[in-house]
Amino acid sequence: MSAHSEESHNIEKLAPQLTEGGTLSRQMTLQISPEQYERLFFQPTPARGDLAKKLGNPTLVGVAGFLLPFTTTVMCLLDFRGASAASFASISGSWLFIGGIAMNIAGICEFILGNTFPFAIFVIYGCHWINLAYTVSPLIGIAASYTMGTVPGADSVAYTAGQGFYNITMALTSFGFWLGTLRTNVPLSLAIFCLIFLFSFTAAAEFAIGSAVTLAQQEHVLYLLKIAGGFGFVTLLAGWYLFITLSCASTGVWCPLPAMDLSTVVLPGTKAAKLERGTASRGGDDAV
């Protein structure tokens, strides 16, 4: 997240007020500092510096860049409206030009602002989209190069084993990110948590494809992919929830959805938490 200009964000709510005509109306302005609402999302400890006061907040772009291609991917995994994993090539453009480019741009902006955690999330998952687009692109033909006889390259043991191990590493990476989200907010933490299982079941499906000979084994592969899609659907719900709250917060629009802050619940006594509340100096000797 970007830290933040010194201006407050005004959110209008209802409160009693007497107008000039004697009519009783209700109006109240609630002022929320940028640090108060932006730290509820990706960066528990807001960055400091002049750049954060001059540049925009790139987090909304990063979240949208993830959700747009991810939504269509999950729909394919769940076989909605006749889509399937075979439909991935048709959406590889969104993986590259929306997921890859938008998330990496957002990640670079977060790096410039000094926000380590969102920088890492956006760049890693952004590069993941680029990798997927490159792998399934018919112009590159990686899967086709594994074709042996009548066995399609995408079904070969060598190809699927490599893809399976890649998804395992992405599951481990997501687990590391999930630990970092425990002091951000519930929607983000839930989204990353479900990604762990999405990658895990996708890896299981990839390993099963290479040995799927009978019809029952092939149906088992589809079952594993649908389970992965189910976890992905939960990530979708949490992600779009986060997108709506970010969109409203970026312009000061009142949003009835709670941010579900975790920074005051998980490890509230750490040095980082004290720095957020201004109760500890950055050069102090407080234990983490």
Image (tube, rainbow, N blue to C red):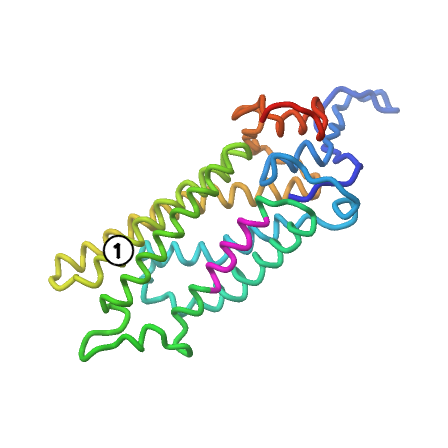
Indicate the position of residue 167 as horizontal and vertical percent values.
35, 55
Task: Inspect the image, locate mark 1, and give the three-letter code of the amino acid beneath it.
Answer: Ala
Q: Residue at x 69, y 52 (%)?
A: 112
Q: Residue at x 74, y 23 (%)?
A: 26
Q: Main secondary structure of the magenta part?
A: helix
On screen, residue 67 above or below 178 = below
Q: Nearer the viewer, residue 75 or 114?
A: 114
Query: How many numbered circles are shown?
Result: 1
The single residue placed furthest to the front in the displayed view is 285
Residue 211 lies in what quarter of the image? bottom left
- Quadrant containing the N terminus is top right
Count neighbours of disc 1 (C-alpha within 10 A) and say few if under 14, some if 14 to 19, many if 20 or more.
Answer: many
Q: Residue 158: percent from the left, percent from the top?
A: 26, 67
Q: Provide the residue designation for mark 1.
A: 205
Q: Quadrant of residue 10?
A: top right
Q: Is residue 233 left or right of residue 2?
A: left
Residue 102 drawn at (x, y percent): 58, 59
Q: Front-most of 59 and 207?
A: 207
Residue 28: quadrant of the picture: top right
Residue 124 in the image: x percent, y percent?
51, 54
Q: Is residue 28 above or below residue 244?
A: above
Query: In the image, is residue 146 part of the stretch drawn in magenta?
Result: no
The residue positioned 69% from the left and 40% from the top of the image is: 47
The region drawn magenta spans 119-130
